[in-house]
Image (spheres, rainbow, N blue to C red):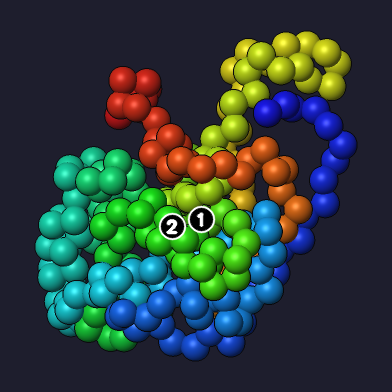
Amino acid sequence: MTGGGAPRSLTVVPVTGMGEIGPGDDLARIIARHGDITAGDVVVVTQKIVSKAEGRLVEVDPDDPADRVRLVEKEAVRVLRRRGDLLITETRHGFVCANSGVDFSNVASGWAALLPEDPDRSARRIRDGLRAETGVEVGVIVSDTFGRTWRQGVTDIAIGCAGVAGVVDLRGTTDALGRELQATEVCVADEIASAAELVMGKASGIPVAVVRGLDPQWLRRGSVADEIIRPAAEDLFR
């Protein structure tokens, strides 16, 4: 993988008309039915519908904030910060995020959506299903909305990957002036997830997008979102 080469044009297409997703639904079949999928595409699927399809839904008391806090704590391996009802936690996946990734939006009142048990496995299942449905090889990213330390606003990131690189290591390649890059590692999976979110939105009911035109070298077997998580020994802020 190199840092140079001609500029690439990308196309990001929302997949519409999928309808409400419920436990047991075959996401790959539904996506293939409603989306235009070609070889080399990366299909970005929001965590919310993955969790719904996998039955990762639990009841909560909508009138009891403490019930929500108990659920968030149950989904955490440790709590890093508290501010009112907001908790910054680390999940068993290794994610450091608000409220253990427990989602109370875009689900029925009295319910919450939990993160998938294994987002990488979820991505592989969808990728394998799309291959069976369409006959083509694609990458799949399971995305979720995260805040960023020291920056306002939220963005979508990759929490699960299959068939597409999480991080592209450009160390040892050269920049536009011929200087060797010493420390540049690009989290392309997060960049792809964020690009997809621009056409999906937060309240438009579009949970899937297709990103086309990516560097073919980014598509690879054996990729996992674990490669994105910074090891604790390298973390300067925890």
The structure residue drawn at horizontal position 47% and vertical position 45%, both measured from the top left corner, is 148
Q: Amino acid at mark 1?
A: Ile
**In x, y percent, where is residue 204?**
57, 80
Q: What residue does disc 2 label?
A: 123
Badge 2: residue crowd in 10 Å (few <14, some 14–19, many ≥20): many
- Residue occupied by mark 1: 141
Q: Is residue 41 left or right of residue 177?
A: left
Residue 140 percent location from the top left of the image:
52, 57
Question: Residue at the spot x=28%, y=86% of the render?
Answer: 109
Q: Does 72 sit left or right of 132 as displayed?
A: left
Q: Tell me if label 2 and label 1 are in contact, CB under 8 Å.
A: yes
Rendered position, 86 above or below 201: above
Which quadrant holds the N terminus?
top right
Q: Secondary structure at mark 2?
A: helix
Which numbered disc, 2 or 1, marks the residue that appears first in the sequence? Answer: 2
At label 2, which amino acid type do we have?
A: Ala
**At 60% from the left edge and 70% from the top edge, which residue is drawn?**
134
- As rendered, which of 62 and 103 lies closer to the eye? 103
| Above or below: residue 115 compared with residue 151 | below
Q: Nearer the viewer, residue 228 or 130?
A: 130
Residue 44 spot, x, y in % from top left: 55, 61
What residue sits 49% from the left and 88% below the top?
19
The part of the image, by quadrant, that contains residue 198 is bottom right
Mark 1: secondary structure? strand
